[in-house]
Image: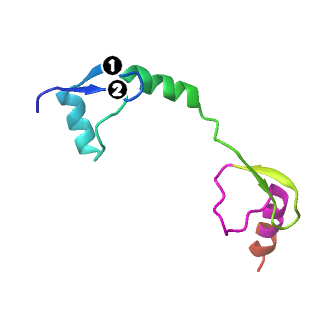
Amino acid sequence: MPDLEITCVQCKRVFIFSEKEQEIFYRKNLHPPQHCPKCRSEKAVGEGNVPKKFEIICDHCGRRDQVPFKPKVGREVLCRECHSALMARTRFV
């Protein structure tokens, strides 16, 4: 496998996807990178380890809260307190 030249989808710069990197990606069953190493590292630093929060209105009590997942339409979503109470009740059933 020869080295590949790939254009970054973010900054439009060309970067080299080396033969060694290709082997690693192939072994891990990954798609080739779409972002150059600089854009990938900036994205990783920018995201940090802070999960994204989504605003919800609890289906049980009507309070506003934030959850770490995107609620699905048609599925019940509970605030932290109602969820904890439900888990406590179901634990002893």
Image disc number at residue 13:
1
Q: Quadrant of residue 78?
A: bottom right
Q: Amino acid at mark 2?
A: Cys
Q: Residue furthest left?
A: 1
Q: Quadrant of residue 48?
A: top right
The foreground one among 33 and 7 is: 7
At horizontal 84% and vertical 58% (from top left) the residue drawn is 81
- Report whether 16 appears left or right of 65: left
At horizontal 74% and vertical 63% (from top left) the residue drawn is 77
Q: Amino acid at mark 1?
A: Arg
Image disc number at residue 8:
2
At horizontal 57% and vertical 31% (from top left) the residue drawn is 47
Residue 57 position, x and y percent, is 81, 57
Is the C terminus in the top left, top right, bottom left or bottom right quadrant?
bottom right
Location of residue 72 with respect to 26 vertically, above or below: below
Q: Main secondary structure of the magenta part?
A: loop
* Within-10-Å neighbours for mark 2: few <14, some 14–19, many 20+: some
Q: CA distance from mark 2 to mark 1?
A: 5 Å
Residue 74 position, x and y percent, is 67, 69
The foreground one among 12 and 2 is: 12
* Within-10-Å neighbours for mark 1: few <14, some 14–19, many 20+: few
- Report whether 21 appears left or right of 66: left
Is the N terminus in the top left, top right, bottom left or bottom right quadrant?
top left
Contact check, label 2 and label 1, Cβ < 8 Å: yes
- Read off the magenta span: 68-86
Residue 70 falls inside the magenta stretch? yes
Residue 33 position, x and y percent, is 32, 34
Residue 12 position, x and y percent, is 35, 22
Location of residue 68 with respect to 77 vertically, above or below: above
Q: Secondary structure at mark 1?
A: loop
Sequence-earlier tag: 2 or 1? 2
